[in-house]
Amino acid sequence: MQVQREEPTARPRPPWWRLVVVGLVAVAAAGHLVVVTLAALPPNTYSEAARPATSYLGAYFAQNWRLFAPNPVSADRTVRFQGAYEQDGELVVTDWLDWTDVELDLVRHRLVGGRAGYVTNKLYGPLGSRYGTLDTDQREVADVADPEDVVSWQRLAQDLRAGSDDALDDSQVDLYLVYDRATTRLATEALEAQRPDSRLVAVRYATRSQGVTLWEARGEDADGRERARPAVRQRINGWREPLRGDEAERASIRDFWASHR
C-alpha cells in the first residue's frame, strides 16, 4: 500500500506595505528613545550639541520622576493675579488675588472636586522653567514694570524674538509665550469675575513659594513653626495686555469664583 505524503503548504508572506509600516514605527521608536536618552544626560558637550534635536520634549514632559526618585512637594506654591483698570481717568491697581487659594477650596471643603481645581498647580512649574530659558535681555523685555507701559502681544513676541540667536531660542520664546498667555487669560477672567464692573487694561501674575516648617522645629507651637519656615520666594511677572476667552469660558470662571471664593 503506497502512502501519499502531503506537502506542507507555504505560509503566505505578509504584504510589503506592512513590513514598511512596521519598519518605520520601529525606527521612529528607536530614534525617540535615543533623543530621550540624550535629553536626560547631565549638561555636557554631547547634551548641548543635541539640544536642537531634543527641544521638542520640553513641551510635553514636565516630570519629576517620583516613581524612581521620590521628591514630594515640600512647599506651599501659589499663583496670584493682579489687575489694573481705569476709574475716573486714573489707573487703579487691584490687590493681589490668590487664585490657588480659591482652587484649594475643592480640596478643603469638597469631598469630590473637578480637574479645574488644579490649574495653577499645573502651571506653576512650567511658568518658572519657561521664564528660566530667557536670557537677560529677553527678561528685561518680559518684565514690564508699569501697567501704563503694557504692549500688545504681537509687539511683545517681536521684541522677545529680537534677542534670539537661533531657531532654538525662538522655540524657547514660543514656549514661554504659550504659558504666559494661558496664565494671563486665566488672570483676566478671574479678576473680572471678582470685579465684574471693572474693565481691565493690564494684568500680571506672580508665582510664590515657601518651604514647609523644618523637621527640627516640628515640636514648636504654631507661631514657632511659622517662624521656622524658610523665606518666601516670589517672582512677579511683567504687566500684560488682558486676554479673554469666549463667553462660555468666562461664565465657567465666574461660576467657579462664586462657588469657591
Image (tube, rainbow, N blue to C red):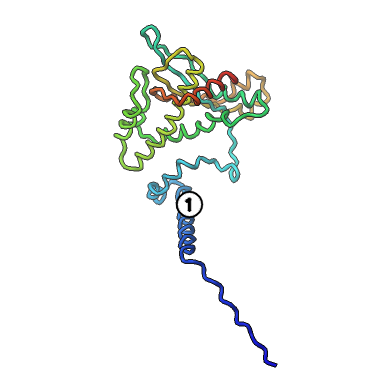
Of residues 237 and 25, which is closer to you in this image?
25
**254 over 48 or under it: above or below:** above
Q: Say left or right for 43 vs 225.
A: left
* Residue at the far bottom in the pictured view: 1
Give residue 13's position: percent from left, percent from top. 52, 70
Of residues 120 and 223, which is closer to you in this image?
120
Q: Say left or right for 166 vs 231.
A: left
Of residues 218 and 78, which is closer to you in this image?
78
Quarter of the image with the N terminus in it: bottom right
Q: What residue type is disc 1 on?
A: Thr
Density class for disc 1 (Cα within 10 Å; few <14, some 14-19, many ≥20) is few
Of residues 260 and 160, which is closer to you in this image?
260
According to the picture, the residue beneath numbered tag 1 turns out to be 37
* Residue at the far front in the pictured view: 1
Q: Residue at x 49, y 55 (%)?
A: 29
Q: Residue at x 53, y 41 (%)?
A: 63
Helix, strand or loop at mark 1: helix
The quadrant in which residue 149 appears is top left
Q: How many marks?
A: 1
Give residue 240's position: percent from left, percent from top. 39, 23
Q: Which residue is drawn at 34% across and 28% down?
A: 141
* Residue at the far top in the pictured view: 88
Give residue 226's position: percent from left, percent from top. 60, 21
The quadrant in which residue 216 appears is top right
Q: Residue at x 64, y 30 (%)?
A: 215
Give residue 165's position: percent from left, percent from top. 30, 40
Q: Say left or right for 85 vs 69.
A: left
Quarter of the image with the C terminus in it: top right
* Residue at the far left in the pictured view: 162
